[in-house]
Amino acid sequence: MSQQALLKKEPFGSTEGKSVDLYTLTAPTRREVRICTFGGIIQSILTPDRDGRMGNVVLGFNTLDEYVDGNIAFFGCITGRFANRIYDGKFTLDGADHQLPVNSIGCCLHGGLKAFDKQVWEAEEIAVADGVAVRMTYVSPDGEEGFPGTLTTSVTYTLTNLGELRIDYSATTDKPTIVNLTNHTYFNLGGEGSGSIEGHELQLIASRFTPIDASFVPTGDLASVEATPLDFTKPHKIGARIRDAHPQMALAQGYDHNFVIDRESDDDASLVVFAHAYEPKSGRRLTVLTTEPGVQFYTGNFLNGEIRGASGRAYRQTDGFALETQHFPDSPNRPEFPTTVLRPGETFTSTTVLRFHL
């Protein structure tokens, strides 16, 4: 393989009269990432196993039509303007009430009905010192999905020469608004379509989580994970306690919780390691870093076999896991949580790094 990182652009189809492109980023360390401009979706990530065999380690589809028509599980996409849930689709900002679409169990989920995951983003290759990068930009008009302000969002995907995928988010607004951005990739380090991720070992450097109610919305508490099946402060197999009788596991039908990343202080926004995942059969490992205060750990609980992915195999519960770096769910209605308010003159920034290794 070339000792230089490479970037290739090719057509991926069109939707609603807009052309969609697929960018392939290749690193000299045998890592390849494909990202399409529809939803900013990470379509595939190729990385070797311990025997040198390449495999795609994320869930998704082969064609644009499948993403446009059937991506109800949010495979690989940028979610926004507000990732995760806002209860009843309502929030108040500076005394003004705002109503968003309610699209999931009494909540506005991942920004509404036609949110960032369903938009065609403008893309451009940008020069970086270490690797190759593509920047995707979307301008969300004032009032789109009920959110105030024109929000200009850029997401830069960089594949470094060492094979790390870095995701840098940036957003500005012309009116006070709220913003919470993440990427919704599902990982399976055994390979896409290889079956359950319950045998993966996971460590989360998070000693607290935000308990949920029946609407999957945080109660407002910051609870200790100690003596619960949500304690991943030491490595555990994902499936070891996933069917535990704990009330939080029953409510979520598995893991679908926001974990509070352990930091030096509440205002610490440095880039820190918060997750380690390991798949014993392949030997693949994933280490994740972020500047965000939380992460939604999700085990694909709503995958029911009706969706077939890139391999042609049906996706079922626990066939992939997501680590959605984020601010906490329902933050606009929880003043005790880190703020998600963005005002004119300010810039929202966030970084997440995915490190694949053996």
Image (cartoon, grey):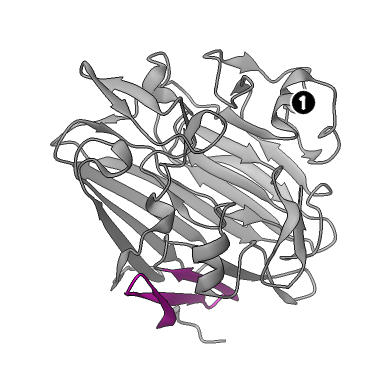
Quadrant into which the N terminus falls? bottom right
| Residue 33 appearing in the image | no
| Residue positioned 19% across, 36% down in the render | 346
Residue type at tag 1: Ala
| Residue positioned 32% across, 68% down in the render | 128
Q: Is residue 121 left or right of residue 103?
A: left
**Residue 262 spot, x, y in % from top left:** 55, 27
Q: Is residue 21 magenta?
A: yes
Q: How many marks?
A: 1
Q: Is residue 285 left or right of residue 130?
A: right
**Which is more toward the observer, 46 or 75?**
75
Q: Residues within 10 Å of mark 1 (few under 14, many from 20)?
A: some
Q: Is residue 135 left or right of residue 219?
A: left
Helix, strand or loop at label 1? It is helix
What residue would you read off at disc 1?
250
**Which is more toward the observer, 90 or 199?**
90
Q: Is residue 78 above or below residue 323?
A: below
Q: Is residue 309 left or right of residue 104?
A: right
Question: Where, by quadrant of the figure, is residue 12 drawn?
Answer: bottom left
| Residue positioned 77% across, 26% down in the render | 250
Question: Where, by quadrant of the figure, is residue 14 drawn?
Answer: bottom left
| Residue 130 appearing in the image | yes
| Residue positioned 42% across, 60% down in the render | 39
**Residue 153 spot, x, y in % from top left:** 28, 51
Question: Where, by quadrant of the figure, is residue 189 drawn?
Answer: bottom right
Q: Is residue 275 above or below residue 154?
A: above
Q: Which residues fall within the magenta stretch?
A: 9-36
- Prevailing secondary structure class for the magenta stretch in the rendered image: strand
Quadrant into which the C terminus falls? bottom right
Q: Is residue 82 above or below residue 192?
A: above
